[in-house]
Amino acid sequence: MAGFCLACAFITFGLGVYVIARNPGSLVNRLFLLSMLLAAYWALGEFLIWQVRTPENIGFYLKASSFWPMVIAVFFHFIVVYCGHPLSRKDNSWALIMGIYAPSLALSLIGLLTDDLYTVIFREGYGYVYTPVTGSYANLFESSYILAVMFISLFIVFISWKSETRGKEAYQKRLVGLGVLTVIASGALSALVLPALGIYTPNMVFLGIAVFSLLMAYAIHTQGLFVVTPEMAMSQIMALIPDAIVITDGTGKITDANEAVAGILGIPREDVSGRDIGEVFGGKSSGSLMDTVLRRGRVTDIEAEIDGGQHRVVSISGARVNNPEGGPAGIVLVIRDITGRKARESALRIANEKISLLTRLTRHDISNLVTALSGYLELMRGDCDRYINPAIQTVQRITEYLQFSKQYQDIGSTRPEWQPLAGIVARAIGEIHPEGLEITVDVPDVEIFADALVYRVIYALIDNTIRHSGGATKVRISTEKGEDNALTVVFEDNGRGIGEKDKELIFQYGYGSHTGLGLAISRDILALTGLDVKETGVPGKGARFEILVPAGAWKER
């Protein structure tokens, strides 16, 4: 039996090295390797104990191998990760540390520093042997703890096996469960049954570990245990892909993801594993996506909106991953951030609409103005003084239309970007130079995602106050935060306000006593990135414009 302990050390060591060589990047493989190395350390210590015949030497090797309880902790960790138990999630690591690793470490230190666990005695026919310290609280705790952990491991494997719908994976888990049961039985035989009968031999648990190793070797070669699974296959390349990659099992539970999910989905990678895909993509649409991928085998370029702290538009492509028997093992989703692309598409669409509108406006209005100017100039031949001023005003209006066409042309010509709100306001005030108008600015240190010409919105509002407020002397620009995390930029003046029937008309092209184009342009500029503006003031008490910035389109600097 002592020689068998040495053989067990070599078997477990070799099996651990073989498994890790199949996929060094897999956490399951790494935990299996560590548990096998610790088992080899334990078996080697048992072998050395039975090679020496003096109580001093036996006591020395007992102390040297006192960290054997860590085998139990690491093996339990391997089981929960292999079975996908919730304890394997990173946010539950504290439970593993406090409930499994800490007691194992405590028992190891008790064995190293005290004699409360085992003692060396002399038995006729056996010589000096070690035996548990009966009546010791430490020994009682050790026995209870180890049995509890092993039976919980067996229970986790059993539940995982019963819930497994794939034939080969279910058979793998049956073999793992059988191996765990063998280890429990052989350990109980050596720790409880044989000492009660007065029989002292090397620890029989190593017989169970050897059987467990043989079962694992059989499962590897006949059932594909520790082969490259969908989860393992992607782990080697996931870190190199800028797109988010999400891997699920057949039930829709996320098993792995790459680091890019944090930037695209707004969820740290460690918080994604173990969650249902519906929690990430939201409700019914995610279930439909899952069903579509499983039914069709693959999907490409499905667009979805995700609000993970910052509104994003993503393109989702997915493929079903089959198990060796041809059944669905899960899906792999590739998620690409297309927010910028969608913004450019929207800008292009609006630009096309603007070109069409601009053509109609300028062709009609400038044609009329030029006709009027020609008439005035013709009349000036007889009475210059009477018609010179209307002619000059007509030229000015033509100039304003041409300036408008230049401004309108620039909307959407550059990519939307994050801009400090205070800088936007300051630029608008600096360009219009509103003399005699007191402007108070009270905005937080935030950025908004908008077209580069967004400052023209504030410019147009100030210009509107100067021209149409009826003598306003004060303007206040501030912000309000809504319950839905939207930000409202408020522009208020102390003028005569805007009548109820005009609140929406002022944003239409051609409405008003001037060109009637400034506020219309403002709404187009804001619409490029999903912003909007409306007038909510009380007539007679001043104008109040609210620029609505949705959640995700603004952030604190």
Image (spheres, helix red, strand yellow):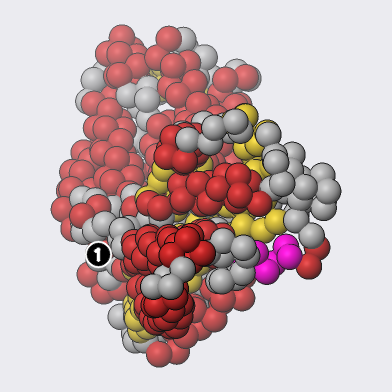
In the depicted structure, whether residue 7 falls above or below residue 506 = above
Please, what secondary structure does the residue beneath circle 1 have?
Answer: helix
Drawn side of residue 105 relative to residue 467, left or right: left
The location of residue 109, given as percent across then percent down, is 44, 16
The quadrant holding residue 136 is top right
Quarter the N terminus occupies: top left
Please tell me which residue is depicted at 25% across the width and 64% down the height of the picture. Answer: 233
The location of residue 280, given as percent across then percent down, is 53, 61
The location of residue 439, given as percent across then percent down, is 60, 31
Majority secondary structure of magenta residues: helix
Q: Nearer the viewer, residue 278 or 11?
A: 278
The location of residue 210, given as percent across then percent down, is 30, 51
Please tell me which residue is depicted at 62% across the width and 19% down the height of the picture. Answer: 137
Q: Is residue 260 visible?
A: yes
- Verify whether residue 504 appears in magenta: yes
Residue farthest to the front, as pictured: 382
In the depicted structure, whether residue 498 falls above or below residue 135 = below
- Verify whether residue 361 appears in magenta: no
- Label 1, on which residue? 233
Magenta stretch: give its range.
502-507
The quadrant holding residue 22 is bottom left
Drawn side of residue 424 relative to residue 319, left or right: right
Local packing at callout 1 (Cα closer than 10 Å; few below 14, some 14-19, many 20+) is some
Drawn side of residue 66 relative to residue 466, left or right: left
Please tell me which residue is depicted at 54% across the width and 81% down the height of the picture. Answer: 288
Please tell me which residue is depicted at 25% across the width and 52% down the height of the picture. Answer: 239
Q: Nearer the viewer, residue 544 or 366?
A: 366
Drawn side of residue 33 relative to residue 402, left or right: left
* Residue type for callout 1: Ala
